[in-house]
Image (cartoon, coloured by chain):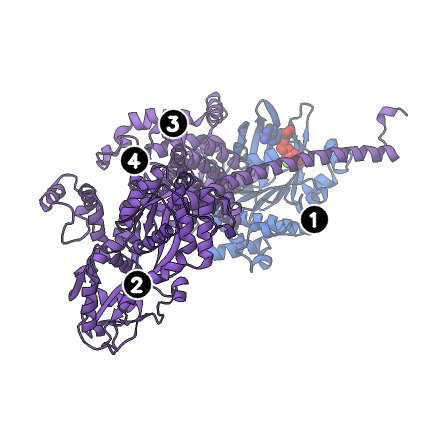
Amino acid sequence: MSQQTSYPEGSALKGQITSRQRRGSAWQLAFQVSTIIGIIALIALLYNITNQAFGLVAIQNKVEPSSLVLALEEERLLSAENTVTSEDDNELVAGIASDANAIGFFGYAYYQQNSDQLKLLTVDGIAPTAESVQNETYGLVRPLYLYTTADVLAQNQAANIFLNYYLTHINEEIEDVGYFATSDAQLSEARAAWTAASGLNLQPGQWAAINPEGITGQLSVVGSSTLFPVNERIAERLAADGFAATVNLANVGSTAGLRAFCEEGTADIAAASRPITSAEFEACRENDLRPIEIQIGTDALAIVTSPENSFTTNVTQQELRTLFDTATTWADANEAWPNNPVARYIPGADSGTLDFFAETVFPKDLANLSKETLVELLTANISVGLGRRLEREQRFYDDRLVFDDPDLFAEACASDNPAAGCTMPARDQENVYELLLQEVVAPDVVSAWSLMDSLFARDEVEAFVATEYPNAELTFRSWLTLDFITSPQSSTPEFAGVRTAIMGSLWVVAITVFFSFPIGVGAAIYLEEYASDTFINRTIQTNINNLAGVPSIIYGMLGLAIFVRTLEPLTSGALFGVGDGTTANGRTILSAGLTLGLLILPVIIIAAQEAIRAVPHSLRQAGMALGATKWQTIWAHVLPSALPGILTGTILAISRAIGETAPLVVVGASTLIFVDPNSPFSKFTTLPIQIYQWTARPQAEFRNIAAAAILVLLVLLLSLNASAILLRNRYARRA
Amino acid sequence: MTSTVTGFANGNLAVEARNMHVYYGPFRAVKDVSLKIKTHAITAFIGPSGCGKSTVLRSFNRMNDLVATARVEGEILYHGNNIYSNDVDPVEIRRRIGMVFQKPNPFPKTIYENVAWGARINSYKGDMDELVESSLRQAALWNEVKDKLQESGYSLSGGQQQRLCIARTIAVKPDIILMDEPTSALDPVATLRIEELIQELKKNYTIIIVTHNMQQAARASDFTAFYNMDEDRAGYLVEYSGTNELFTNPKNELTEQYITGRFG
Ligand SMILES: Nc1ncnc2c1ncn2[C@@H]1O[C@H](COP(=O)(O)OP(=O)(O)OP(=O)(O)O)[C@@H](O)[C@H]1O
Ligand SMILES: [Mg+2]
């Protein structure tokens, strides 16, 4: 028996099988590795997008909402009836002391001087004491600050010594002046900030030891009148200790002091009875100054009545708000109080105390203001030109105009192309609030961090913001929000949304599907069921197969030539008399949808052909054998059986269409449109185009919203696919 | 060709093939077949694999039209008309001459729909529920499926599926039912049931059945036609006569060899 015709036996057989198995395992491993590579690629993609779409942001307002409200509230305080306003504190004291129905407020220091003539009220049940002020359980407090910069400290030895002396002895003086001392903890924090900035490497014990004697030089301390007496005392003590430098103390108010410090460069140290505002901070930064903030005490407001007032010893903040604003009688603020008219005594408009009161007592939240108040704020803070534009977009009141001239407005409304504001109902409170935020407060993302940095390097981020943007607010932001999805496009990333793009994508895809699905399936049925095997049909088939591989940009050029140019009367809607004159001629949703329809047509045809071909022949025979016509058999049996396959192919094709950019750019997608598409003849943009444009913008935040838009696109794709799959499964189950 | 089946009256003639040749492209699969089929009788086609039994059977209701390359020459007379003449619509022929296939092929629809569909597309007027029930009863399937008419036809066993296909065919009330090896995919019990069913159906329908099962032909048919292939693989009719006669007293030597299992 010859070797060639035998099979391996025994150990040879075993070895042979093992080697075959090993080859199989190697292949299996290779497939597993490919799957894993695919999964890793997907995860990397998602990681990348998510990392951009969520994370910390530092947001800084152009104008603080609180300062907007403050100005308004002061206005109202001053104009309330039965109000005595005076810059002369003695006049106020005398007025309050003699009137049992009077109420007023002072800086706490001033109350102390006149405590024998006045009665101090507790606020929300808490009296101003060292403790209640320090821990801010007493509501009407404001911190007192000195501002300086590292440069000053490094260059001006006198300023250095002054500040050191100030921090060492402030708590011996401040209570005497009538303010409240800062806690030791806060003081050492302030010292640390100062030492770090000054470059002096001092241990806490070494502080007091620095001897001011014999130090000469020049030093100017400018600012708050509130802090002026404190500064004076420190300067006097220093001089007594032999400090020989010239100290210029200027009592010009906090705002002027900070201006001198940041903008004019004429102050070494600024004194302020409020924190520096973001605008002031920016002004400093523009001049390469980085202010160091040192809290040296706290001021409190005293709410006082006449000693003759017998009905109360306490007010709540709510009652304070009513008493100084709308109340005419005491009973308006609290029913338990008598029905006597309120007599109000307040410091004048130039006084920081009025700011202090308005700031601490009245809410700073814009969102709760009435529509009228918000419109007032808007009027005061935007240009008439912008106001007019906004008013023509949508009016503020149905019965009157705020910005526009009535005649001009009427004229604009009578024109052929009247503004939307002519017919739309007036804006509501929420709308005006949004406007105010956008146009006046204008919050700006000054810096943004990736999700990973936000989660794992939060401390560094916080430190960075504290030094670079101390007025900015650090919040965790999901760039993907409901607002983002429902807002139209905007040129500021803060307010930009993808609604226009989503609508554009949905419109375009709808047209794509309505065009390519019936035609594609129809062609597939013809080619599979009816076409005989002739040369022409084979040529058609080959062409379709090749068309599926043509680069999409070529379809864009085809679409531009056919739909945008040649068929312009049709695609612009002019043929139906519906296109609005301003749209970009043939560059409409219809053209885009048809172009993408052409693009995916071959894919749908091929997929449908495959699906139809896969329907067992026995099914057709069964139908025909019952006396059904060919079409009846196709309709009742072939198509339902092929439908799951056809739908699968269509889903893939649609996914491709949704993600396309190149052909749409060629067909003429609009770069910036703010109006939702509302017909096939509208201008359009789509999500991928929006994303493409955003990623090309220089501002970093556009990349964040691009990432968020990618997530929206993914979700849109997934939900379209999911619904198509559900549909498919329904058909598949019926079989 | 030896044919002894000429003795029945013209009124009993269901369908007749005259000098029929069938080609698939250039290949002649069936050559010069002539035979008459008697009404309300069961005629069996037997013969070795590939000799053209299915081809002949499909020619009777123009199912060969579904094969692009197929071509029929000669005549098939049904009610005196050639079904292959130009003015005949094959749809009407298939409506009159139904077919049950070798492999059960129910529609991917409910049992009810499987039966009702053919009736509906042929514009049946009458109570559909009744028609479905009577068809299923005639196909001896009613008792097994009456409680699950809305379930898929695929949920039935192979034998049940085949009876469903028979019920579906009966529902359009054809004259003739062509059956191409209807039991080849079934077990002996299911086979027996189908055979009994065919006997039952004979009262109302003319049946032509292709089978490889000699016992089945002998047991269940009234007439038997034996086909064979010549050297260029063209099938031809060798002998056609009453089943008893063909099995007990075959005229042709090939027939005898075939039924005794000596070739094929
Ligand atoms: N669709 C077709 N296209 C081309 N040739 C075919 C086709 N169908 C059948 N044939 C050929 O025709 C001849 C007869 O086939 P047919 O199916 O009629 O044989 P059969 O007798 O039914 O065989 P079996 O008993 O195996 O079913 C065979 O040679 C076969 O190859
Ligand atoms: Mg066959």
Badge 2 or badge 3: first in the primary sequence: 2
Q: Which residue is mark 1?
A: B187
Query: Is B47 placed left or right of A107 in the picture?
Result: right
Question: Which amino acid type is shown beneath numbered disc 1?
Answer: Asp
Which residue is depicted at the point 35% across and 67% down? Answer: A128
Q: Are marks 1 and 3 on the same chain?
A: no
Residue lying furthest left in this view?
A407
**Label 1 residue near ligand 1, CB within 8 Å:** no
- Chain of the residue under label 4: A
Which residue is depicted at the point 48% across and 48% down? Answer: A726
Q: The residue tagged with tag 3: helix, strand or loop?
A: helix
How far is the residue under mark 2 from the one under mark 3?
77 Å
Front residue (pair A402, B213): A402
Discs 2, 3 touching: Cβ within 8 Å: no
Badge 4 or badge 3: first in the primary sequence: 3
Q: Are marks 1 and 4 on the same chain?
A: no
How far is the residue under mark 1 from the one under mark 3?
61 Å
Question: Which amino acid type is shown beneath numbered disc 3?
Answer: Gly
**Label 4 residue near ligand 1, CB within 8 Å:** no
Q: The residue tagged with tag 2: helix, strand or loop?
A: helix
Query: Is A569 placed left or right of A450 in the picture?
Result: left
Return the x and y of residue B10 as percentages of the image width and height: 54, 40
The numbered mark at residue A683 is 4
Q: Are marks 2 and 1 on the same chain?
A: no
